[in-house]
Amino acid sequence: MVFQNKYTNPAKLEDFINSCVNRMQNMLSLDRSLQQHHGDSPTIWIPPTDGITKINVDITFRNPETAVGIGYILRDSAGNFISAGTKSANAGTSEQVECWGIHAAIQEGIRCNLKHVQIESDSKAAVDYLQGKPTNLFWSSSFILDEAKVLSSFFGSVSFSFCCRTGNNIAHNLASEADLSSSVAHIYNRPPF
């Protein structure tokens, strides 16, 4: 009545709402069953432009009392493997671990003597901070990222970008495989299984 200046029968309106809700529930259950059948959603990795190496980085975080995993993978614009690595660490929050992950990825890029780099993370707050956008990071996370910025000056050029979890799946899998009982970083010179 308010929006269309028409009287709507409450029973018809109730039927319409119920059919919409049922249709949405059916779509959600179909989506869940497809995900269970096919596993995780497909990885969508977008290659960087020619001459740039992309470093994808991600972490696993269970709670502040246990070690966390960091994983990263370096690939060129054709998608060719350059290097990958895992590392375990300790941190109080998942935000801090995301920042340490970016820090570790930059260190690996320096070790590989890269010149033009794009670092991709699924931590929107960390990427926004590195891009100079306003964020609400803890001071300890900002400190880690400030150090990462200084390290990134070793590259000829560097950019930071956000990607959704599906585009960061390989880095996430590497982080999940990090040996949480060891503080020694593992570097892969060939693609890990």
Image: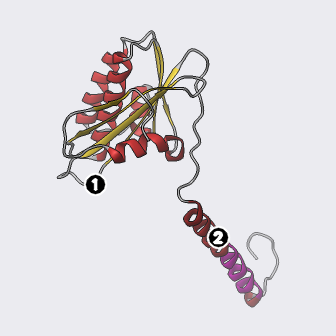
Q: Quadrant of residue 78?
A: top right
Task: Pick the residue in front: 86 or 136.
Answer: 86
Query: Considering only vertical position in the picture, is 103 above or below 13?
Result: above
| Residue 165 drawn at (x, y percent) | 49, 46
Quadrant for the N terminus in the image: bottom right
Task: Pick the residue in front: 55 or 151.
Answer: 55
Rendered residue at 59%/60% (across/down):
38
Query: Considering only vertical position in the picture, is 95 above or below 32?
Result: above
Q: Residues within 10 Å of mark 2 (few under 14, many from 20)?
A: few
Q: Secondary structure at mark 1?
A: loop
- Its colouring scheme is secondary structure
Whether residue 69 appears in this view of the structure is: yes
What secondary structure is the stretch in magenta mostly built from? helix
Q: Secondary structure at mark 2?
A: helix
| Residue 154 drawn at (x, y percent) | 36, 11
> What span is in magenta?
12-23
Mark with earlier residue (2, 1): 2
Q: Which of the numbered marks, if any, corresponds to residue 118?
A: none
Rendered residue at 30%/46% (across/down):
94
Task: Pick the residue in front: 53 or 80.
Answer: 80
Task: Report which residue position mark 2 lands on.
Answer: 30
Separation (CA) of disc 2 from disc 1: 30 Å
Q: Amino acid at mark 2?
A: Leu
Task: Report which residue position mark 1 lands on.
Answer: 62
Rendered residue at 53%/56% (across/down):
40
Rendered residue at 80%/82% (across/down):
7
Q: Is residue 128 magenta?
A: no
Q: Is residue 17 magenta?
A: yes
Residue 5 lies left or right of residue 126; in this view the side is right
Q: Amino acid at mark 1?
A: Arg
| Residue 29 drawn at (x, y percent) | 61, 72
Q: Residues within 10 Å of mark 1 (few under 14, many from 20)?
A: few
